């Protein structure tokens, strides 16, 4: 949705992410691929964004936020309406990794960070070093070198004048990196995240799991996981499992009303799936609410008492419902 004035952009209190960066950096493509299921190859035909676009996401009481997609031609400087940054939780600045040298992009990022941080010191910043998917980025060492170079240049520009939280990510819409990065970004907008992580930690411990993720099914962004470090390979497996469940349901599954199970994922919390891997582990998916799925990684020998596992997940789901109530009333999250 295009908007014409600042009042429309900040008209509500929905947690907001501001997406900005140089012209043709891939900002709109990112949102289309992650949240609107556009194929990465289709983004080649997207028109240039002429004005600020708002992408609103409202799955349930926890997954509710919006993105402001600023065109590359839009200037963010001292003249920008302060109200914009007062309502913003995260600023994402996209740098095209294939547009070397990066001096202009780094200078623009510096200006955005300085202006936004001065108005709202609570804003966190994520720098996306994007389009690391060409032949020149085949080596992970090369990606790390570019990230280190941009990090160094930006820190030199800021010269310790801004005490802000700045994170750097190498991303591409052709692999899982963009989804994992936006998982981390979205989590910053969820006040109940510490409680969710604590609940998942208890679930993992009491159910002898290796890892657990709470996914937004439609975008494959995980809104929480247990506190153990996230391994990209395990995330990719869980993300691919969601694709498998949705694709198979589209072909074979029919709900009681005759519609495909995949089309009813938004409306119910009854789907489940088990996939056995050849390394002695398995993936277990359970729908826990509208658009939310719990995906767990377990050793096969720890799946011997599924009824107890399902009971623990039922308790987790009940706690999730209490968190929803807390989010609706604006109350303090459970402890």
Image (tube, helix red, strand yellow):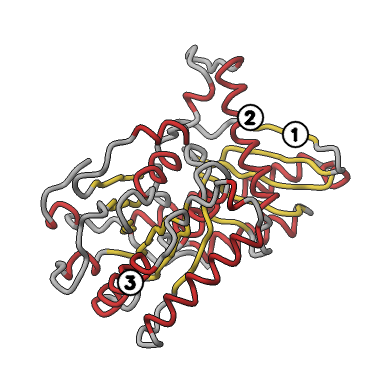
Q: Which residue sits at x=42%, y=52%?
A: 62
Residue 172's spot in the image, x, y percent?
A: 51, 48
Q: Secondary structure at mark 2?
A: helix
Residue 215's spot in the image, x, y percent?
A: 55, 46
Residue count near mark 2 (Cα–Cα under 10 Å), binned few <14, some 14–19, many ≥20: some
Camera-nearest residue between 219 and 261 = 219
Measured Cα–Cα span from mark 3 to mark 2: 43 Å
Q: Which residue is mark 1?
A: 275
Residue 102's spot in the image, x, y percent?
A: 41, 65
Camera-nearest residue between 79 and 180 = 79
Marks 1 and 3: in contact by CB < 8 Å?
no
Confirm whether residue 252 shows in the render. yes
Marks 2 and 1: in contact by CB < 8 Å?
yes
Q: Which residue is mark 3?
A: 107
In the drawing, does residue 221 fall left or right of residue 326? right
Measured Cα–Cα span from mark 1 to mark 2: 10 Å
> Residue 283's image quarter?
top right
Confirm whether residue 15 shows in the render. no
Q: Which residue sits at x=22%, y=40%?
A: 1
Residue 159's spot in the image, x, y percent?
A: 39, 87
Of mark 3 and mark 1, the one earlier in the sequence is: 3
Asked if residue 272 is positioned above or below residue 81 in the image, the reply reads above
Q: Nearer the viewer, mark 3 or mark 1?
A: 3
Q: Which residue is mark 2?
A: 244
Measured Cα–Cα span from mark 3 to mark 1: 48 Å
Q: Which residue sits at x=69%, y=46%?
A: 296
Camera-nearest residue between 92 and 243 = 92
């Amino acid at each position: 949705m295009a908007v014409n004035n600042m009042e429309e952009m900040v008209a509500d209190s929905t947690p907001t992410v501001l997406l900005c960066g140089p012209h043709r950096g891939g900002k709109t493509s990112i949102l289309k691929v992650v949240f609107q299921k556009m194929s990465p190859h289709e983004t080649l035909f997207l028109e240039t964004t002429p004005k600020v676009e708002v992408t609103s996401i409202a799955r349930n009481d926890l997954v509710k936020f919006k993105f402001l997609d600023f065109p590359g031609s839009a200037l963010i400087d001292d003249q920008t309406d302060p109200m914009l940054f007062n309502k913003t939780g995260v600023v994402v600045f996209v740098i095209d990794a294939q547009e070397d040298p990066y001096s202009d992009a780094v200078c623009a990022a510096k200006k955005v960070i300085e202006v936004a941080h001065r108005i709202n010191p609570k804003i966190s910043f994520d720098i996306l070093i994007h389009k690391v998917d060409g032949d020149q980025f085949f080596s992970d060492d090369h990606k790390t070198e570019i990230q280190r170079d941009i990090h160094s240049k930006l820190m030199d520009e800021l010269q310790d004048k801004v005490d802000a939280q700045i994170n750097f990510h190498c991303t591409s819409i052709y692999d899982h990196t963009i989804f994992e990065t936006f998982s981390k970004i979205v989590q910053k907008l969820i006040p109940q995240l510490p409680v969710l992580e604590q609940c998942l930690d208890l679930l993992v411990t009491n159910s002898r799991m290796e890892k657990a993720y709470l996914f937004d099914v439609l975008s494959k962004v995980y809104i929480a996981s247990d506190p153990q470090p996230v391994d990209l390979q395990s995330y990719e497996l869980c993300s691919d499992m969601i694709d498998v469940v949705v694709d198979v349901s589209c072909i074979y599954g029919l709900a009681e009303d005759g519609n495909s199970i995949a089309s009813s994922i938004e409306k119910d919390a009854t789907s489940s799936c088990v996939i056995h891997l050849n390394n002695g582990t398995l993936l277990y998916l359970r729908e826990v609410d509208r658009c939310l799925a719990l995906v767990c990684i377990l050793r096969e020998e720890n799946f011997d008492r599924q009824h107890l596992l399902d009971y623990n997940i039922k308790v987790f789901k009940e706690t999730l419902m209490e968190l929803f109530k807390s989010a609706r009333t604006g109350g303090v999250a459970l402890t």
